[in-house]
Amino acid sequence: MPPAVEIVPVRSADQMALAYAIRRRVFIEEQGVPAELELDQDDLSALHVLAVADGQSIGCARMMLRPDGAKIGRMAVLADRRGRGVGRAVLLHLLTAARQYGAKRAYLHAQIAVEGFYLKSGFQPVGKVFDEAGIPHRKMILPL
Ligand SMILES: CC(C)(COP(=O)(O)OP(=O)(O)OC[C@H]1O[C@@H](n2cnc3c(N)ncnc32)[C@H](O)[C@@H]1OP(=O)(O)O)[C@@H](O)C(=O)NCCC(=O)NCCS
């Protein structure tokens, strides 16, 4: 059985560095997103989380609380740890946090290739496909 995954809020610079390292591997190295687009101003205000298994950080995500809802982004699980519920655990943790903060809905810009992942947690696509960092995306929304 794979080790249990714990989702922890990022509270230190060291933890933030671990989240950035995962994002670098997944978005910049694996998906070819330009480094200057991967890091942005939202990182300064977002709530960041890490997925930790057996003492190793294997996934991350961030969430920004905005007037129109909680925007989730930068969801990433290391390639060799996918398909075992880590992404879902991260997403559910953020949705619980969003409800606790009083957000009325969660939304995100889903890569078309992973729409199915978000559909399984109840998100619905809205609007047209658009380009973000050279990758087709569509907005998805979940009322909370
Ligand atoms: C998207 C991502 C975070 C999913 O993480 P994961 O740990 O592999 O997902 P889980 O194992 O928790 O999957 C939960 C469910 O979604 C499904 N799922 C996962 N990835 C999917 C995909 N690409 N398409 C359709 N369904 C998918 C799983 O089969 C599982 O379904 P089940 O409930 O029937 O078992 C991960 O694939 C990833 O990091 N991808 C690269 C980065 C990326 O594209 N991030 C999203 C940016 S919008």
Image (spheres, helix red, strand yellow):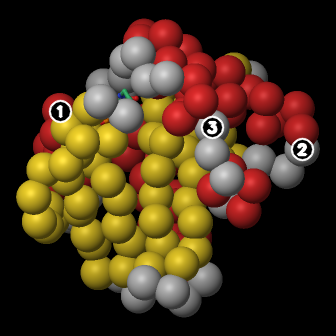
Q: Mark 3–mark 2 contact, CB under 8 Å? A: no
Give, as a three-letter code, the residue at label 3: Leu
Q: Residues within 10 Å of mark 1 (few under 14, many from 20)?
A: few
Whichever of labels 3 and 1 marks the residue nearer the N terminus, that label is 3
Residue lying furthest left: 128
First in sequence: mark 2 vs mark 1: 2
What residue is pinned by disc 3? 39
Q: Please, what secondary structure does the residue beneath circle 2 have? A: loop
Disc on the earlier residue, 3 or 2: 2
Image spot of residue 74 (x, y percent)? 49, 42
Q: What kind of residue is marked 1?
A: Ala
- Mark 2: few/some/many CA within 10 Å (<14, 14-19, 20+): few
- Look at 58% across and 74% down and name the residue there: 65
Residue drawn at (53%, 35%), measured in percent from left and top? 37
Give the image quarter of residue 18.
top right
Seen in the picture, residue 44 relative to 97 is either above or below; the reply is above
Q: Nearer the viewer, mark 3 or mark 2?
A: 3
Of 68 and 142, which appears nearest the observer?
A: 68
In the picture, which quadrant includes the N terminus?
top left
Numbered mark located on residue 88 in the image? none
Q: Which residue is depicted at the point 55% across and 34% down? A: 38
Task: Check disc 1 and report the residue beneath it.
Answer: 113
Element under label 3?
loop
| Cα–Cα span, label 3 and label 1 | 21 Å
The answer for how far apart the CA atoms under marks 2 and 1 are is 32 Å
Of discs 2 and 1, which sits in the foreground?
Answer: 1
- In front: mark 3 or mark 1? 3
The foreground one among 84 and 114 is: 114
Q: Nearer the viewer, residue 124 or 30?
A: 30
Judge the density around disc 3: few (<14), some (14-19), many (≥20) Cα neighbours within 10 Å.
Answer: some
Q: In which quadrant of this rendering is ligand 1 seen?
A: top left
Mark 2, residue position: 12
